[in-house]
Image (tube, helix red, strand yellow):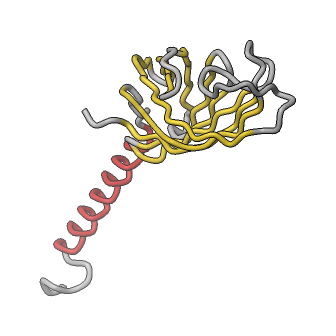
């Protein structure tokens, strides 16, 4: 016969099962939190620099793609108007051009990576936190205006 505090008591066994159950619940909860598709709806904005060959409505000027490249500061806003699961869409504009450019984004199954496109080029993004995204954007000289652009910058969601 063992005494109340000794190894193998019913109390120790119950505590071990309870600890195991709580650990299991914690793992399941953490796994479900990682599985949540991020809600991207809202207004996102960011400032950064682009390398630009030529010109377009967001990077105006007399330059052509044959001119030396320019490094330009920018301020962009993206309005994600709707989302259906892993698909999100809306429009963007810049501080230089109020032209609304439509875009479409698709969220990867890892819930961190996003790809997308607009009428000029493509996006590659990483969700850093619920209100912060790193965005990389590029377009080739095949767009209607013929410009070439590349940039990466951080965007933050406007507080509601």
Give the residue furthest to the front. 62
Name the image quarter holding the N terminus.
bottom left
Give the image location of residue 21, x and y in percent: 29, 57
Of residue 124 and residue 100, the one placed in the foreground of this image is 100
- Asked if 84 appears above or below 96 in the picture, the reply is above
Give the image location of residue 99, x and y in percent: 52, 15
Of residue 74 and residue 67, the one placed in the foreground of this image is 67
**How many circles with numbers are drawn on the protein?**
0
- Asked if 104 appears above or below 14 in the picture, the reply is above
Q: State the residue at coordinates (16%, 85%).
A: 5
Image check: 40 left or right of 69? left
Give the image location of residue 78, x and y in percent: 46, 26
Q: State the residue at coordinates (63%, 22%).
A: 117
Name the image quarter holding the C terminus.
top left
Q: Quadrant of residue 102?
A: top right
Q: State the residue at coordinates (33%, 47%).
A: 29
Give the residue furthest to the left. 4
Of residue 58 and residue 91, the one placed in the foreground of this image is 58
Of residue 95 and residue 135, the one placed in the foreground of this image is 95
């Amino acid at each position: 016969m063992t005494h109340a505090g000794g190894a193998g008591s019913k109390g120790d066994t119950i505590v071990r099962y309870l600890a195991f159950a709580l650990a299991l619940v914690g793992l399941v909860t953490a796994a479900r939190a990682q599985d949540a598709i991020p809600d991207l709806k809202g207004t996102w904005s960011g400032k950064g620099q682009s390398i630009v060959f030529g010109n377009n409505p967001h990077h105006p000027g007399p330059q052509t793609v044959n001119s030396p490249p320019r490094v330009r500061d920018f301020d962009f806003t993206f309005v994600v108007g709707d989302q259906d699961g892993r698909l999100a869409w809306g429009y963007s504009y810049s501080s230089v051009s109020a032209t609304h450019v439509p875009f479409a984004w698709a969220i990867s199954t890892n819930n961190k990576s996003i790809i997308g496109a607009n009428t000029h080029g493509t996006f590659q993004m990483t969700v850093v936190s619920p209100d912060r995204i790193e965005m990389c954007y590029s377009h080739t000289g095949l767009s209607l205006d013929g410009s070439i652009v590349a940039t990466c910058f951080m965007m933050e969601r406007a507080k509601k």
